Image (tube, grey):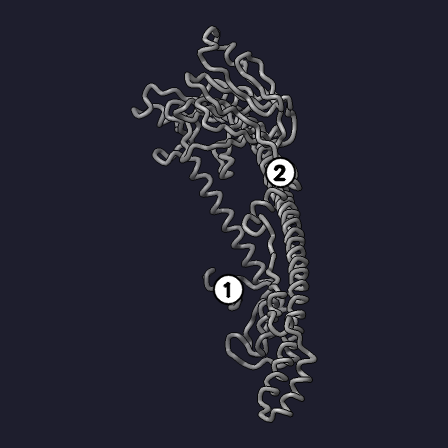
Amino acid sequence: MEDSISKDLTCSICLTIFTDPVSLLCGHSFCRKCITNSLSIKDQCPQCRTTVPKEEKYLPTNHILKSLAEKAKEAEKIKREQGDETTGVAQFLCPEHEEKLKLFCETDQQLACVICRDGERHDGHKFKPTKEAATSRRRELEKGMEHLSDDINAIESLANTQREEITKTHVMSQQLMTQISTQFEEMHQFLRQREEEIKSELKEKKTEAVEEMTETLKVMDLALSERRELQVKMTAALEISDAVKFLQSWTEVNNMLTPECLFRPRANDLQVARTSLSLGPYESHLQFFVWKEMLQVVKPQAELLSLKSYRGDLTVSDDGRSLLCIHFKLRIHIVDESDAREHAFSVNEFSSGQHYWETEVGKGGYWELGVKGHFLKYDGQKYVISNQSSETELTFTDRPRKIGVYLNCSSKELSFYDADKMKHVHTLSSSLMSLPVSAYFNIGPSEDIDPNPLTVCWY
C-alpha cells in the first residue's frame, strides 16, 4: 500500500517524490522545475505527448499533491531513522549470544559479552569493561594523533620546501636559458662581425687586384687596336698590283712605321698582371685562427693560475705556470709520507663563485690535480678520484693530454674534464670541503726522469 502511494507521488521525470508539484490540463503531474525544463525543450506532456499551450506554461501549485508529497517524505525519513536505530542496537549485541557487549578481551583484542567471558574460547583471557578499555585506547589514539599531527606538519613543511625548490628550479632554468642564449649570441655576434671583417678585407683585395688587372687589360686592348689598324693598312697595300699606286700607298704606310715599330714585337712590352688574392692563414686555417681570436673576448676565461711549491724537490718555473719534479733518486731521504704530500698550490684562492682551469699533464708518469683533499690522481696505470679518505677508480678511453678542473664553491662540487675533447669525466661533491681553497698540484713519486712538467694553461 505504502509503495503504491509513493509511486503515485513520484515525478515521472526525476523519479523522486514531488517537489512543488503542478498538474497539466491532461491530468499528469510533475515537479515544477522538471516540467518547466521539459517544456522549454518541447511543448508536449512528457507522458501522453499532448501539446501544452503557451498560456498553460504558467501553472499554479497543486497543494493537495504537495501536502501528500511532504507527508510521504516525512514517513520515509522516520522509517530510515528507525531502521538505523535497529541496525545500531544490533551492532552492539553479541552476534553469538545476543547479549550486550559490555567487555573487551585484552588477549584477543575484541568486544565480548559476559557469556563469552565465561566460555571456553576466552578461558584465561584478561578482560576490561568497555568504557575503561575505550578510555585507555582513546589516550593511545590521542598520543598517536599528536605524533601524526607533528608528522603531518613536518611533511607539509617538507612538501612546501620541495615546492619552493621546484619553483627555484624553474626560475633557475629560465635564468640559465637566458644566460645561454645571451652568451651564444655574443659569440654569434663576434663571429658575424669577424666574418664581415674578413669578407670586407677580401673585397678590398679583390677590388685592388681587379683594378690593377683592368688597367693592364686597357693597355693591351689599345696596343691590340693599334696593331690591327696597322695590319689592315699593310694588307691593303700588299693587295695593290699597280707599281705606282703601290708606291703611293707604301709612302703613306711607311710614314707610320719605323723598323723598330715594325719588327720589334709589342707583346714584349706587355705582361699579364697575375692575381695576388690571398687571405694568408685565414685561407686554410680560418676556423683555428678565429677560434684563437674569440678566446680573447670569451668571458669568463680559464683561471690564470700561478703556482707555489712547499717541497724542495718540486720546482716552479719562473713564470709560475709549470711544476717540475726532481728525479726520485735525489729525494730518497724523505721518510715521512705526510711531508712528501705537502705539494704545490695556486697562489689564487677561491671562496665563492665558479672557477675553471686547465693543466697540461703531458706524458707524466704520476700526477695529482684538484684541490687539497679532493683530486684526480694518475699513477702511470690507472686514474683514481681521491676524496678525503675514499678513492674511486675511473676508466678513460684515451689517455688525456690536458685535464680541466671546474670548481663550484656554492655547491662544493669539483668536476674533471678531458680538456682536449671537453668531455666530462667525473664530479664529486663534498660538504667537508672547507673554503677558501687553492688549486692543488703534485708530480711524483716516479722512478723515471719525467721531462714533462705540469703546466697550467693560459689563454
Q: Quadrant of the C terminus?
A: top right
Task: Determine the residue positioned at 45% across, 16% down.
Answer: 445
* Disc ID at residue 459: none
Q: Position of residue 136 (x, y in %)?
A: 50, 23
Task: Specify the amino acid type for callout 1.
Answer: Leu
Q: Give the x, y percent position of residue 13.
A: 52, 68
Residue marked by disc 2: 164
Q: Is residue 188 visible?
A: yes
Mark 1 is surrounded, within 10 Å at the Cα level, by few (under 14), some (14 to 19) or many (20 or more) other residues, namely few
Does residue 268 appear to the left or right of 141 in the view shown? right
> In the image, which is nearer the foreground, mark 1 or mark 2?
2
Q: Is residue 338 above or below residue 405?
A: above
Q: Which residue sits at x=68%, y=60%?
A: 208
User: Cβ–Cβ below 8 Å for labels 1 and 2?
Assistant: no
In the rendered view of the protein, which quadrant contains the N terminus? bottom left
Judge from the rendering whether residue 378 lies leftward or rightward of residue 454; answer left or right: left
Residue sitting farthest toward the left: 120
Q: Is residue 135 above or below residue 64?
A: above
List x then y, in percent, for residue 371. Answer: 56, 23
Circle 1 sits in a helix, a strand or a loop, which is it?
loop
| Depth check, front residue: 39 or 307 | 307
Of residues 146 and 98, the one nearer the viewer is 146
Q: Residue at x 62, y 38 (%)?
A: 164
Q: From the viewer's side, name the closer residue of 247 and 80.
A: 247
- Give amino acid for label 2: Glu
Tell me residue 27's x, y (percent).
Answer: 55, 76
Residue 302 vs residue 290, the one in the foreground: 290
Image height of 64 relative to 81, above or below: below
Q: Which residue is mark 1?
A: 15
